[in-house]
Amino acid sequence: MVGAADKLIRMRTTAIEHLDVLVVGAGLSGIGAGCHLQTKCPDRSYAILEARERIGGTWDLFRYPGIRSDSDMHTLGYSFHPWDQAQAIAEGPAILNYIHDTATRYGVQRKVRVNHRVVSAEWSSAESRWTVVVQRTDTDETVRISCTFLLTCGGYYRYDQGYTPDFAGTERFPGPIVHPQHWPDDLDYDGKRVVVIGSGATAVTLVPAMAKTAAHVTMLQRSPSYIVTLPAEDPLARLARRVLPPMAAYQAVRWKNIALMILSYQLSRRRPRLMKSVIRRSVLRQLPPGYDVDTHFRPAYNPWDQRLCVVPDGDLFAAIRHGQASVVTDQIETFTERGLELRGGQELEADVIVTATGLQLLAIGGLSLTVDGREVRLSDRLVYKGMMLSGVPNLAFAIGYTNASWTLKADLTCEYVCRLLNHMRRHGYDECVPADDPSIVREPLFNLDSGYVRRSIETFPSQGSKRPWRVHQNYALDVLDFRRSAVDDGVLRFSRGASVPAAPTPAATPAVA
């Protein structure tokens, strides 16, 4: 009976393609993962599955006016591929070109399979592998791929749907109501009155960009956000490129910016009144005399309780100074035939309304996980090193920092996955799993008080009260932890499973747009 069952398992598993590593998502993180695998694990077979028809992730999806990074590109760029453009706060198309260039330079584009949406993954301890169910979004075909290690790089928000509150009276407004995540190519706002609802990174990007051709743009916010001005072009980067080799110049500017981010965050946590004062003085200098700064630019929370918004060269404040844009702080009572009626009685007339009201979070891309037939409830799990789940074998996920550039943490995660894979191969291990610690005090995974976090945090796994379950928001500490600490740390449990012969890997890969 045992022999027959073993034969049945082998027949079933060899019927589908098998890969050493399967990467989910071909955005900034997924392409970076491919580059790390190419250079650090060159003998492993892998593929990158992308649900959409093109690579680029966020930077291909979002098409609204002025879209740009909310972090400097010397830290949002990859550690191994220097950002060499003049603009430190870069526009979306330039970032997308950078991702494509990286994929081409490192040969990763050959490994990408577009129109492949990962639906579910089932782990079998008997086979020491994942079986992944994939929906072809171009043909509706369902395919199955097995892998030894699963790495999800799809971020943590829903690509198909942004967040819009249930506003009263939207049916009364005759003009377009647009969410930035679904920006129509044919939207005409030239010479028109625009109201942008929101005060986050998307809103402060949209307002000055649309103000260039709109009749007037009003940023309508329920409450203010902290807005910080940074130079669009880093002066140190300009100097460093003249006197240092490209990689040395890149690393110098990168570490300077990392140090400034850490300093800003630590000061905000330890001396919030000082940081409030510094930010307020900067805003005062950029607005007209007598402007009501405390109403429109003085948040009720401390800096870094929510992410700071960055505006390159103070473009938002320049649009306000020049009369192209204005800020109104109030709540919406209802949409009307002419625009918006506010709680305070004011009516904002508009031809176009943009609801820059946020994202919807989605843990590991909504992927359904089971381990040996038992469903994995993410909210029951602890996060190991900010990248693995307690009790879930051979799986990692890449997410970024909340107080710094996304790619800093994603890069470290992908590096560590390669260290882990190489450690397992050297020692003949088939499985690794973070062992749960019942003594750990659970805490929310994200330490932000933003609305998009509050709406969804209960669906995410938890971090713990001490290492390695504590999620550091400090790149310098994580560099030591991810690159220098022992892989076999007593928390990761390694084992040798019943290896099953792999099916041959097909050579053909769908074309990448």
Image (spheres, rainbow, N blue to C red):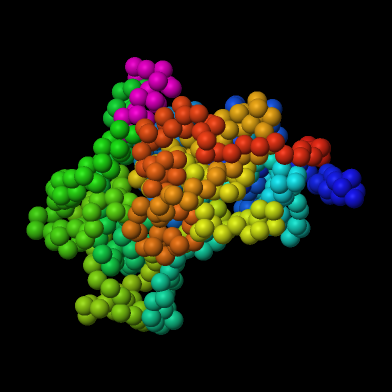
Q: Is residue 286 magenta?
A: no
- Front position in the image: 77 or 424: 424
Direction left: furthest residue? 290
Is residue 119 shown to the viewer in this render? no
| Location of residue 385 in the rendering, given as x and y in whole percent from the top left corner | 47, 41
| Location of residue 127 in the rendering, given as x and y in whole percent from the top left corner | 75, 44
- Front position in the image: 289 or 410: 410
Residue drawn 33% across the image and 22% down it = 240
Numbered disc total: 0
Direction front: furthest residue? 439
Which quarter shows the C terminus? top right
Vertical placement of residue 487 versus 394, above or below: above
Tell me the quarter of the picture where residue 10 sits: top right
Tell me the quarter of the picture where residue 347 sits: bottom left
Residue drawn 64% across the image and 31% down it = 424
Residue drawn 63% across the image and 53% down it = 51
- Front position in the image: 134 or 202: 134
Vertical placement of residue 306 versus 270, above or below: below
Q: Seen in the image, is 320 located left or right of residue 147?
A: left
Tell me the quarter of the picture where residue 323 sits: bottom left
Q: Is residue 250 magenta?
A: yes
Residue drawn 87% across the image and 47% down it = 2
| Location of residue 84 in the rendering, given as x and y in whole percent from the top left corner | 43, 29
Q: Seen in the image, is 161 located left or right of residue 3?
A: left
| Location of residue 451 in the rendering, given as x and y in whole percent from the top left corner | 36, 63
Give, as a single range, the part of the protein colored magenta. 242-257
**What is the magenta segment's predominant secondary structure?**
helix
Is residue 123 shown to the viewer in this render? yes
Vertical placement of residue 46 versus 237, above or below: below
